[in-house]
Amino acid sequence: MLFYLIDDHQMFAEALKNIIEGFGHNCTVSVFSDARFALEKLKSEKPDLIILDLEMEGIGGTDMLKILSQHGLDIPVLVCSGNLTPLNMAEIKEAGARGFLRKSESIAQVKEAIIAVVEGGYYPAEFQETQSGKATKQHPLSPRQQAILTLMKSGMSNGEIADMLFLSPNTIKTHVRLMYDTLNVSSRIECLNKARSLGL
């Protein structure tokens, strides 16, 4: 099995890589310190699981989930973070994560979470309890537009975004125009500034 581990804390990533590969079952872990490197690699191979840090420089974990959801590859993602709260757990689940794991958990729990996520999902009991009966906040942009916005923030051109999401440049242009209409802006700079002011 091939796993991607995306985490910019090198010591933790290397330690977790060794732990996972020690589980056996022909596990191979590719470590990426930057989400963009992993996105580039996804053009040529499909891992069985992605283990994703939440807080990283550049493309963060939640933004990465939004991008992955538009790839159409249906790769299970386990978010592994030292900063999990009921609020961000709800956000990353909505963005497509199949499970959450705190970095403080035991090796046995790491193995349990990986198996559960590959087979379906792994959500702590505390998350299930806090989310019971809560309404989901509506996002003004579609999931695809959220992914495009994330890549725009990273400085990519429309052509690079199209290549990253396996879409045509014309499709990206159409979505960008719809984003401008939704946010009532007329340029990329205005769009990014408006998105930032709205917390998008």
Image (cartoon, rainbow, N blue to C red):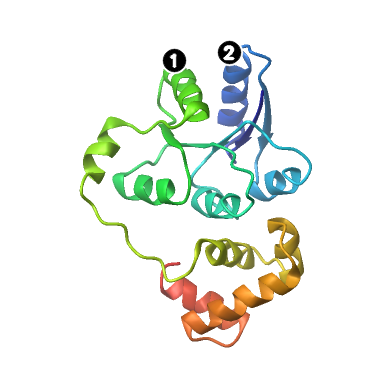
Say which mark, if any, is on residue 108.
1
Question: Does residue 139 appear left or right of residue 115 in this picture?
Answer: left
Q: Is residue 34 above or below residue 140?
A: above
Residue at point 36% right, 65% down?
138
* Residue at image mark 2: 23
Q: x, y (%) of residue 101?
A: 42, 32
Quarter that holds the C terminus = bottom left
Quarter that holds the N terminus = top right
Label 2's element?
loop
Label 1's element?
helix
Q: x, y (%) of residue 48?
A: 63, 31
- Callout 2 amino acid: Phe
Query: Is the residue marked by circle 1 packed among few (<14), some (14-19), or many (20+) residues within 10 Å?
Result: few
- Callout 1 amino acid: Ala
Q: x, y (%) of residue 4?
A: 64, 34
Question: Does residue 2 appear left or right of residue 110 in this picture?
Answer: right
Query: Is the residue marked by circle 2 packed among few (<14), some (14-19), or many (20+) residues within 10 Å?
Result: few
Residue at point 27% right, 31% down?
125
Q: x, y (%) of residue 198?
A: 41, 73
Question: Does residue 1 appear left or right of residue 87 in this picture?
Answer: right
Measure the C-alpha gap from mark 2 to mark 1: 10 Å
Q: Is residue 104 above or below residue 86?
A: above
Count every numbered label the image shows and give the total. Answer: 2
Residue 173 occupies quadrant: bottom right
- Sequence order check: which comes first, mark 2 or mark 1? 2
